[in-house]
Amino acid sequence: MQNFAIGLSGLNAAQAALEIVGNNVANAATEGYHRQRIELTPAAYGEIPAGVDVAGVTRMVDTLLEGEILRQESAYGQVSQELSFLSTVEATLGEFSDSGGLNATMDTFFDSLRALAAHPLEQVPRTDVISTAQALTGEFRRLGASLASLADQVTLEAQNTVDSINLLVSQIAELNGKIQAAEIGPGLGEANNLRDQRDRMIADLAKLVGIETIPRENGVVDVAVAGIPVVTGAMVVDLRLDVSSDESLVVSADGAAKSSLEVEGGRLGGLLSLKNGLLKDIRTDLDTLARAVVNAVNQVHAQGLGPEGSFRELIGWPLGTAGLADLQSPVTDGTFYIRVTNTATGESQRYAVDVDVSGPTPDTPASIADRISALDGLKASITSSKLYIAAEAGYTFDFSPAVLAEPIMQNFTAVSPPPVSVSGLYTGQENHVFTFTVAGSGSVGNGALQLSVADEDGEMVGTLNIGTGYAAGEAIALDSGLKIAVGMGDLNAGDSFQVQALATTDTSGFLTAAGMNAFFSGDSAGNMQVCREILDAPDRIAAAFGRDLTDNLGALRLAAVRDEMGRDLAGMTPGEYYQRIVADLGQQVALKEARQENVEAVRQNLLQQRDDLSAVNINDEAAQMLLLQQMFQAVAKYLSSLQTTMTALMDVM
């Protein structure tokens, strides 16, 4: 009977082995399937051979190799996601398109201002400035809207990815339960097909987010994301996605008090890196550039005037409830000047308004309005959080740096002093009060009369002859562009007068922050616009800084913004700053491409190693099948021979 047991064990072993071969062949094209191998051992009863035993079925898998593949899948998922979106952003900027992108649009705008400077009183250049300004703001808004849309798309895809992660987590936990139940119960041991299904889902999960796997008893595998176990046996913890107050994406685990997880790897890691880092930085840089252009242009434009001349009233934009130091355009301790003109006499008076933002009682918009209202001919108020300034009847006002027609102070001791008039365009870079002191005594145009000129620090800047050879009333030009004319009269040694020369009428930045006589509006790329007052009245474009409004100094200074170093742009011009944004983006794309290629090469090498070990080779399986078939036939023949022998023995007996 022992011989029959040996034969039957051989048949059972051959049948079981054929089933494994059949399973391998059937799953040859199944993704994630690991080839299985039956383990046969010789059976014995003591020292007596007792046939063959099926010891189990081995799944051909290298645990260390599989773990490294999971890490590379996560790395590849993240870098691919980042590269895809950054390439889209690069195309959105369009710097290398036929239209030339934002940089070319900025150049066109500033070129139009330079053309206006060549013809400051003509209408066509003003219309061209309006057109190019609208094109510039339109390009900023297009880029801002495109980047905002991409950010929203990233948020949506991140939410979908979290949903997919939670679904996979629940499926992995469910399979953990089935595997554990199958391997605890009777059978061949490991539930290999279920393990393959579970491991394939873990691989899919690794593509979505970086994970850690921890093998447990009975085939169970726990899974952790960012150190938080999301699968523990058959139990799960779902992830959730929230948007913080600064529009960053925050991933947390249910029941973990919404603590932010440092998620890396996979598609979700790439999306978080984009929204919270790469894409956010590009949007921030573009908004910074837009604000810098708005502030720099408005700072110059607030001080100038167009052919329409001075104002009867002005209203700015909302200042909100924050302090002056927290406005979109920075306000510092300083002074701004308002020139008030009597329309009947043409006489102008300039008033200084001090701004304090760092003292124990810092100024507010309301306190500045009160200070303006205290000036002769003006009234001001805060209306809907906007600064409103109006001139009283018979007056106009502006913030022009044009020199006043008369000195701001005169100290003449002669009985018949001469009249002094001031004109010209001050081209200096700093504000000064120049003191003109008389050397010598006598009548203007005679003798050795001279005027020594010194700034407020006492530094000599020039000497003017008003004695012999000078025609009374003739304008004498200083190197700074100021012109002084001294009429007929007598002067004594030591007599003096002072002239105020302003390079800027606002050292505090308050006028720009309040939106006074602004050209652009907006605090980001997405809402940058040309002010409606400029669109409705091109003659409001401030091309002039001089008293008669026929000069081009305002237009020249507006055009010079392109070449000036911006304090908000790390010392770069607007064009240089934008080129840096584009260059940084291009570098990021190149780095991501190189990273993707490197990870893909490693990934493919690891997958090939896994295929060498775990993939099903149809030829090998066919050879194995043939061997098992021959084994089955031989064992069957063996049993048939035993049966014949037993029958013959029975017949003899």
Image (cartoon, rainbow, N blue to C red):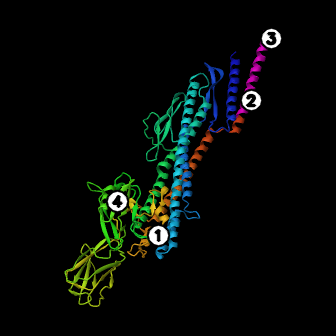
Please give the label number shown on residue 630: 2
| 1 or 3: mark nearer the eye | 1
Please give the label number shown on residue 202: none
Q: Position of residue 528 (x, y in %)?
A: 48, 58
Category of crowding for the residue at label 4, using alpha-carbon neighbours closer than 10 angstroms: few (below 14), some (14–19), many (at least 20): many
| 1 or 2: mark nearer the eye | 1
Task: Tell which circle, 1 or 3, labels the residue nearer the N-terminal end.
Answer: 1
Task: Tell which circle, 4 or 2, labels the residue nearer the N-terminal end.
Answer: 4
Residue tagged 1? 539
Kind of residue indicated by mark 4: Ala
Quadrant into which the N terminus falls: top right
Residue tagged 3? 651
The residues bearing labels 3 and 4 have C-alpha atoms spaced at a distance of 132 Å
Q: Position of residue 294 (x, y in %)?
A: 44, 62
Q: Pointer 1 and pointer 2: residues touching (CB < 8 Å)?
A: no
Q: Main secondary structure of the magenta part?
A: helix
The residues bearing labels 4 and 2 have C-alpha atoms spaced at a distance of 107 Å
Q: Pointer 3 and pointer 4: residues touching (CB < 8 Å)?
A: no
Task: Tell which circle, 1 or 2, labels the residue nearer the N-terminal end.
Answer: 1
Residue tagged 4? 380
First to last magenta residue range: 624-653
The residues bearing labels 1 and 3 have C-alpha atoms spaced at a distance of 130 Å
Kind of residue indicated by mark 3: Asp
Name which residue lies at 75% across and 18% down. 642
Q: Position of residue 359 (x, y in %)?
A: 27, 56
Q: Secondary structure at mark 3?
A: helix
Kind of residue indicated by mark 1: Asp
Q: Secondary structure at mark 1?
A: helix
Q: Pointer 4 and pointer 2: residues touching (CB < 8 Å)?
A: no
Task: Tell which circle, 4 or 1, labels the residue nearer the N-terminal end.
Answer: 4
Does 314 appear above or below 491? above
